[in-house]
């Protein structure tokens, strides 16, 4: 057996291993970036939904505050009418 017959396959195997390892790292990084993009998309969707819900609830609070103000005014008028009668 010749020394070249041993060295060439060993070097080829080592180079193949190193190049395969680099390719694997690149594939993992690509998958990692894809997962981050999916997560961001989901997060943005949740944020938009929450913004809409906050706007809806803010409007509802405003309506309820107006009702409270109207009831407070009516209560004040009724108290004044009662005190005027007494």
Image: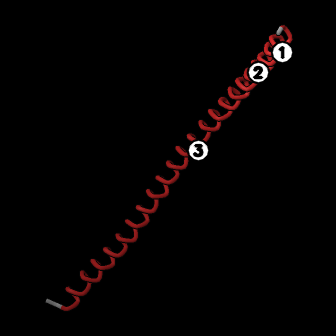
Answer few, some or many: residues within 10 Å of disc 3's Cα (few below 14, many 20 plus, some between 14 and 19). few
Q: Residue 60, located in which quarter of the rendered image?
A: top right
Q: Position of residue 8 (x, y in %)?
A: 26, 84
- Comparing labels 2 and 1, the label whose residue is closer to the camera: 1
- Residue depicted at 74% across the width and 20% down the height: 67
Residue 39 at what x, y percent from top left? 50, 49
Residue on which disc 1 sits: 80
Q: Residue at x 60, y 37 (%)?
A: 50
- Image quadrant occupied by the C terminus: top right
Marks 3/1 in contact by CB < 8 Å: the verdict is no
- x and y percentages locating residue 13 in the rendered image: 27, 77
| Residue 21 percent location from the top left of the image | 35, 71
- Please name whichever residue, 84 or 11, is drawn nearer the observer in this view of the structure: 84
Q: Nearer the viewer, residue 8 or 19?
A: 19
Question: Secondary structure under badge 3?
Answer: helix
Query: Which residue is at a point 29% across and 79% down the rendered structure image?
Result: 14
Relative to 52, 1 lies left or right? left
Element marked by disc 1: helix
Judging by the rendered image, the residue that carries numbered circle 2 is: 72
Q: Quadrant of residue 82?
A: top right
Q: Residues within 10 Å of mark 1 (few under 14, many from 20)?
A: few
Q: Which mark is residue 66?
A: none
Residue under label 3, please give it: 44
């Amino acid at each position: 057996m010749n020394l070249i017959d041993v060295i060439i396959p060993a070097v080829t195997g080592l180079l193949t291993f190193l190049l395969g390892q680099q390719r694997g790292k690149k594939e993992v990084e690509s998958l990692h970036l894809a997962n981050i993009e999916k997560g961001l998309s989901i997060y943005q969707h949740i944020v938009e939904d929450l913004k809409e819900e906050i706007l809806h609830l803010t409007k509802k609070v405003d309506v309820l505050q107006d009702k409270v103000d109207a009831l407070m005014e009516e209560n004040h008028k009724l108290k004044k009418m009662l005190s005027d009668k007494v």
